[in-house]
Image: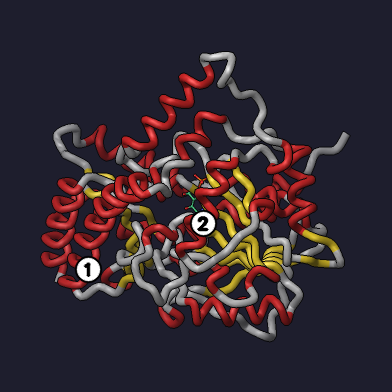
Amino acid sequence: MKVNHHYFEIQDSYLFATVGKKTAEYKKAHPDKDVIRLSIGDVTRPLAPAVIEAMHRAVDDMSRKETFHGYGPDQTCYGYGALIESIKGSYAKKGVFLETEEVFISDGAKSDLGNILELFAEDTVALIPDPVYPAYVDANVMSGRKVIYQDANEGNGFLPMPDESVHADLIYLCSPNNPTGAAYSKEQLKAWVEYAKRHDAVILYDAAYEYFIRDESLARSIYQVEGAKECAVEICSYSKTAGFTGVRCGYTIVPQALVRDGHSLNKMWARRQSTKFNGVSYITQMGAAVVFSEEGEKQIGENLNYYRNNAKIIADCMDRLGIWYTGGKHSPYIWFKCPGGMDSWTFFDLLLENANVVGTPGSGFGKNGEGYFRLTAFGTEENTREACRRLEAFLSSMK
Ligand code: PLP
């Protein structure tokens, strides 16, 4: 019996394990030091009160014979009408109109970013940006697919644009981006949509951070670009939008207009989901269904503003220090160039020892991340301010 040997082609991810190990070692050696972690990619603010109330109501529903819910509705791959309608409503506010059958409820973005690959032949080629959220690469390698990379760097503002001389079948785009925080404009995405159509390719658009965007010229959905429904799947999540990292809920849009090789990808995905997925819990879906209500949006907006304010504190610090960076404005991530041409891990060690601040070395996200560093806005305001004060004092002393 043979196992899937592609699993042995995946590179071991030492990034967060090494960050954790080095931080723990430092704390052990210096128990009196107050170490601040701005490396976390997880949210820290609690769920919005409207979500909690809706989930409580859903729990009560489950306690009564008349309102009990078992498996979700078959016709919509187990997504409840209230949730699907609220997602359609949220898209409509962005000028994007969806059919009920195009919205698939998921347990978060990560599963579908990998699972969607099942719809495509194994010899399709995936184009992935470097640096990148590591799950895209690993899911493709596990499935035996060839991966080619598109360079994101200072020259293109970490927003790579299509190269006509390169052919790809699947194109991963993430905007606002993790780890770089850079966000594509609608104009830039138009070029990607045109490229995808010319190459008969499909864009897998990860919009997990779209709720951080506040500038009209930036895309909150790839479907804000004309013709995108014919070439893109959009994968979204309540994780960063509404603090659902521990609750687990997201949604994937597979348009009916998306046809490849003569087949509807929407029908194929519906078939895949009804075979291999049994839906997200009723309680979770009812909580998610109020996120885009007037009250819900107001409340999640308060949490988002809290993180945005932290991001601004870090971005302002970079501005004062004259350090080149992306992100921080439409994203909870700030991606900056290590001072003095230092490599990412050298800077990590120096920052930990001299400022007692932990961030994430950019080299862990791909070769183009070498020499860069990621800080996140998911900490407390107090810690963020203090970390920036220390960072500034440390870097000023180096000048
Ligand atoms: N996509 C990106 C770019 C992410 O950064 C993350 C999580 O950090 C995910 C997807 C996964 O999100 P979810 O919690 O919805 O699985």
Q: Nearer the viewer, residue 279 or 158?
A: 279
Residue located at (60% from left, 80% from top): 162
Residue farthest toward the bottom in the current orientation of the protein: 165
Mark 1 or 2, nearer chain start: 2
* Label 1 sits on residue: 318
Can you give x and y, in whole percent of width and height, for residue 196 in the image?
68, 76
Can you give x and y, in whole percent of width and height, for residue 232 in the image?
65, 66
Circle 1 — which element? helix
Residue located at (43% from left, 25% from top): 57
**Which corner quadrant of the image does residue 389 belong to?**
bottom left
Q: Nearer the viewer, residue 355 or 381?
A: 381
**Which corner quadrant of the image does residue 254 belong to?**
bottom right
Quarter in which the C terminus is drawn? bottom left
Whether residue 240 is visible to the viewer of this picture, yes or no, is no
Quarter in which the N terminus is drawn? top right
| Three-letter amino acid code of the residue under disc 2 | Tyr
| Three-letter amino acid code of the residue under disc 1 | Met
Structural crowding at the residue carrying mark 1, measured as other residues with C-alpha within 10 Å and reported as few (<14), some (14–19) or many (≥20): some
For marks 1 and 2, give the CA distance.
23 Å
Can you give x and y, in whole percent of width and height, for residue 258 in the image?
73, 65
* Label 2 sits on residue: 133
Q: Is mark 2 within 8 Å of ligand 1?
A: yes
